[in-house]
Image: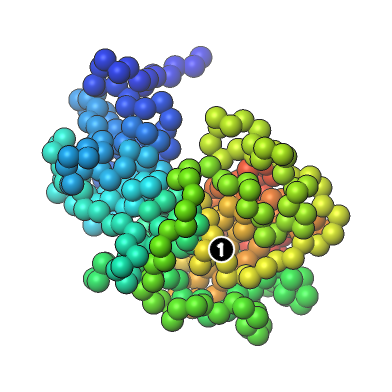
C-alpha cells in the first residue's frame, strides 16, 4: 500500500515547506536535501534530525538568496551549492556553509550587468549542470547557454566550430553499427560538413558574454506564445488561441496542430546562443545533451565545439515529436530520452540518430 509522508505548507509553522510549488532537488554530499520552490526560496531538509531550514530573499540583506523563485540547484565537485533563480540570477554557497548551513549563511551572487563584460547574460535561469570536468553550465530563458569561468568569474559563450543539422544527416550521414560485444553503441562520430550559412558566432569562440540591456516585457517563467516558434511553418495554426491549456500550470500549451510540409530550420546556432535552455545532461562520452524549448534537442561537444541539432520534421515519423523539449535523460545503455511539452516522450537511438 502507499505510504507517503507529506511535507505541506503552513504559514503559521516555520518548520513546514515554504511554498507548495517545488521546482528543484539536490542532495548534497552531507546528506542534506535541498528543495527549490517557485516563490518560497530554498528548503533544506535534515533527515537525521527531521528539521527544515529555509533560505529566503531578504531585501534588507544583500547576502541573502537573490530571489525566491528557485528553478535549479546543483552541487559541484568541490562541495559548493549553486542555485539558479528565475529573475535573480545565480547564487553560490561555499562548501563550508553547505556542510553546516545556518539561517545567516551568505550567498555569492552572479547577476546580469549590461555594463560588465562577461557578466551573466540573463537573470532568468532555467537549469544548471555540473559536468564530469566540474564545469558549471547555465541554461537561460532566452539567452542560450553559458559556462562560468571559475578563475575569472566571467561567463563564456560555448565555442561552436561547426553545426550539423537533421538535413545533413538525412542527406548522407551513415551511422556506424554498434559493436556486437559493447552493448549499446557509443554516440557515432559525425562527418565534417561545411559550416552552415549564418552558423558562426557573433563573438569569438569561448569569448566572455557581452550582455545587452534586457528587452522590456513581463518577467514570467512561462513561455511567451505571442512569439512565433522559428520552426513552425504557420505560427497562427501551431498553437491554440491562448497558447495554454491551463493558465495555472507551468509551461503548459495546447498540442501543435499537424503540419503537412517541411518547416524552415532557421539559424542553427540559435538554441545555444539565444535560445531557451530548459535542461542539460551528459552522456558517457562527454557530450552534453541540451533540451531547448522551441528549438529541439542539441548534442554538444565542449572539447571540439561540434553541435548536432535535432528538430521535429513533420515529414519524418522518426524525427523528434516536438521542439518543445523540457527534460532530457541518458540511460545506462546510452539511449537519450527527451520529454516534451505536448509531444510526449521520445527515445533517441545514438547508433542511428532516430527517435522512437
User: Would you say 292 lies left or right of 180 here?
Assistant: left
Helix, strand or loop under label 1: helix
Percent position of residue 342, x then y: 67, 41
User: Would you say 288 lies left or right of 228 here?
Assistant: left
Q: Nearer the viewer, residue 35 or 40?
A: 40
Q: Does residue 107 appear anywhere in the picture?
A: yes
Percent position of residue 202, x then y: 50, 78
Q: Residue at x 84, y 59 (%)?
A: 261
Residue at the front extreme, as displayed: 216
Quadrant in the rendering for residue 49: top left
Q: Does residue 338 appear anywhere in the picture?
A: no
Q: Residue at x 34, y 52 (%)?
A: 89
Q: Nearer the viewer, residue 283 or 271?
A: 271
User: Would you say 1 lies left or right of 171 here?
Assistant: left
Q: Residue at x 58, y 52 (%)?
A: 293
Q: Residue at x 55, y 51 (%)?
A: 328
Circle 1 packing at 10 Å, graded few (<14), some (14-19), many (20+), is: many
User: Would you say 156 lies left or right of 48 here?
Assistant: right
The scheme the figure's colours follow is rainbow
Percent position of residue 150, x then y: 26, 67
Tag count:
1
Report the residue marked by disc 1: 271
Percent position of residue 97, x then y: 16, 45
Residue at the right extreme, as displayed: 260
Q: Is residue 77 above or below residue 24?
A: below
Amino acid at each position: 500500500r502507499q505510504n507517503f509522508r507529506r511535507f505541506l505548507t503552513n504559514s503559521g509553522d516555520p518548520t513546514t515547506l515554504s511554498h507548495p510549488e517545488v521546482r528543484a532537488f539536490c542532495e548534497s554530499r552531507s546528506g542534506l536535501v535541498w528543495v527549490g520552490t517557485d516563490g518560497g526560496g530554498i528548503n533544506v531538509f535534515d533527515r537525521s534530525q527531521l528539521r527544515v531550514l529555509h533560505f529566503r530573499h531578504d531585501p534588507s540583506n544583500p547576502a541573502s538568496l537573490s530571489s525566491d523563485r528557485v528553478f535549479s540547484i546543483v552541487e559541484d565537485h568541490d562541495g559548493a551549492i549553486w542555485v539558479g533563480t528565475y529573475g535573480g540570477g545565480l547564487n553560490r554557497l561555499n562548501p563550508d556553509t553547505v556542510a553546516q548551513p545556518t539561517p545567516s549563511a551568505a550567498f555569492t551572487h552572479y547577476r546580469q550587468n549590461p555594463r560588465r563584460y562577461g557578466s551573466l547574460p540573463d537573470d532568468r535561469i532555467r537549469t544548471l549542470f555540473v559536468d564530469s570536468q566540474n564545469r558549471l553550465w547555465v541554461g537561460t530563458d532566452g539567452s542560450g547557454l553559458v559556462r562560468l569561468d571559475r578563475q575569472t568569474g566571467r561567463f563564456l559563450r560555448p565555442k561552436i566550430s561547426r553545426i550539423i543539422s537533421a538535413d545533413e544527416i538525412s542527406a548522407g550521414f551513415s551511422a556506424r553499427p554498434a559493436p556486437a560485444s559493447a552493448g549499446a553503441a557509443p554516440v557515432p562520430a559525425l562527418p565534417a560538413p561545411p559550416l552552415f550559412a549564418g552558423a558562426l558566432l557573433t563573438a569569438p569562440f569561448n569569448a566572455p558574454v557581452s550582455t545587452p540591456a534586457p528587452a522590456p516585457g513581463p518577467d514570467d517563467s512561462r513561455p511567451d506564445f505571442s512569439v512565433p516558434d522559428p520552426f513552425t511553418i504557420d505560427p497562427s495554426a501551431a498553437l491554440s488561441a491562448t497558447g495554454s491549456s491551463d493558465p495555472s500550470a507551468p509551461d503548459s500549451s495546447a498540442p501543435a496542430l499537424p503540419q503537412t510540409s517541411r518547416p524552415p530550420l532557421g539559424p542553427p546556432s540559435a538554441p545555444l546562443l539565444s535560445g531557451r535552455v530548459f535542461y542539460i545532461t551528459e552522456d558517457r562520452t562527454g557530450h552534453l545533451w541540451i533540451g531547448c524549448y522551441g528549438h529541439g534537442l542539441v548534442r554538444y561537444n565542449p572539447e571540439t565545439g561540434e553541435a548536432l541539432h535535432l528538430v521535429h520534421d513533420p515529414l519524418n515519423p522518426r524525427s523528434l515529436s516536438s521542439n518543445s523539449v523540457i527534460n532530457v535523460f541518458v540511460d545506462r545503455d546510452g539511449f537519450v530520452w527527451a520529454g516534451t511539452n505536448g509531444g510526449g516522450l521520445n527515445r533517441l537511438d545514438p547508433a542511428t540518430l532516430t527517435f522512437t
